[in-house]
Image: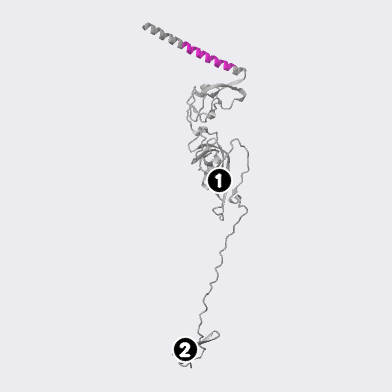
Amino acid sequence: MGNRNLLILIGAIVIGLIAVFLANSYFSGVEQRQERVAEEQQLTRIAVATQPLEFGAPLTPENVRLQNFPAASVPEGAFTNLEQLLNGSRVALRPIVPNEPILASKVSGLDGRAVLSANLPEGMRAVSIPVGAVTGVSGFVRPGDVVDVLLTRKIPGEGARAEDLMVDVIMERVPVLAINQTASENATEPQVGKTATIQVDLFQAQKLAIAEKLGTLSLALRNVESDDAEAALTVTSRDIGSGGYYIAARQQPAAPAPTNFYPAAQTQAAPAAGSVSRAITGPSMTIYRGTDGEEYPVGRLGGR
């Protein structure tokens, strides 16, 4: 019984070895045939992805392969052999779809660090600016979008009031690298962020540092494929227009003169100069001649 089991085990091992040999021979033959086809049709074999790769996904023999590509149309930075691509711990810096060529600009270096700085072109900088629900287009600005940067500030001058504002387009066609700490271009759901990281050159980075102190920065989302150059003019609060309406300052009506509803008090005429006034001790009456009144004593029988 033991010898029988041993023979079965040995037979299984031999069959497995034969299967591995045949599989290697088959794939080696397929690889050689593909190379011959590439030579005959002037094709070049470059590395492509076999499955979707997200930001930070490591490159392995299971998710990359070589594929024939027209020699005259090989993109810059393509890998022509897997050993060069897999020599190290490279990771994807941008989303890569299946059968898409893997380029040097889309993967990290040999150290395998999935850092944002590895994704910056030569001479460019990544700068973060504050945004909100309004200045960030309600969260619809996402990594991979292209925006214009606007600066809103008060018009300089001693005579400018608080409502005298101006808006300038200080940058155009600026790529967005990240919103908050999200740098994946596949994150397309609207998300209101507090900061937007954009790709600019050194001079533009200096302008942004000053503009942030001068006023409010806003992002204007634009078409990614739009290359139209538009004349960026300074817009002020007066350009908004009032529709032809204007309300002048209202003047307060003058206070009416006070009206005397009571007759003037009658006053007794002062005695003429040099005359001696007599004191009247008994009954008296006042007789008016015009506006002058004079008091006379009255006796018991009406005499004076």
Q: What residue type is labelled 2?
A: Ser
Amino acid of disc 1 = Leu
Residue at 52%, 45% (x, y): give it: 212
For the record, the magenta segment spans 17-36
Badge 2 crowding class, 10 Å Cα cut-off, few under 14, some 14 to 19, many 20 or more, is few
User: Does the magenta segment cover residue 300?
Assistant: no
**Which residue occupies the foreground of this view, 89 or 141?**
141
Q: Quadrant of residue 151?
A: top right
- Residue 218 is tagged as none
Question: 73 or 185: nearer the eye?
Answer: 185
Classify mark 2: helix, strand or loop.
Answer: strand
Q: How far apart are marks 2 and 1 (CA)?
A: 94 Å
Identify the residue shown where x is 48% and y is 12%. 19
* Colouring convention used in this rendered image of the protein: one colour
Task: Give the image quarter of residue 81.
Answer: top right
Q: Position of residue 198 (x, y in %)?
A: 53, 38
Q: Where residue 265 appears, x then y in whole percent?
A: 51, 80
Pick whichever, 265 or 130, lies toward us. 265
Q: Quadrant of the N terminus?
A: top left
Q: In this view, does 27 lie above or below 161?
A: above
202 lies above or below 266: above
Q: Where is residue 182? Give x, y as percent.
A: 49, 35
- Write down the residue under mark 1: 151
Q: What element carries label 1?
A: strand
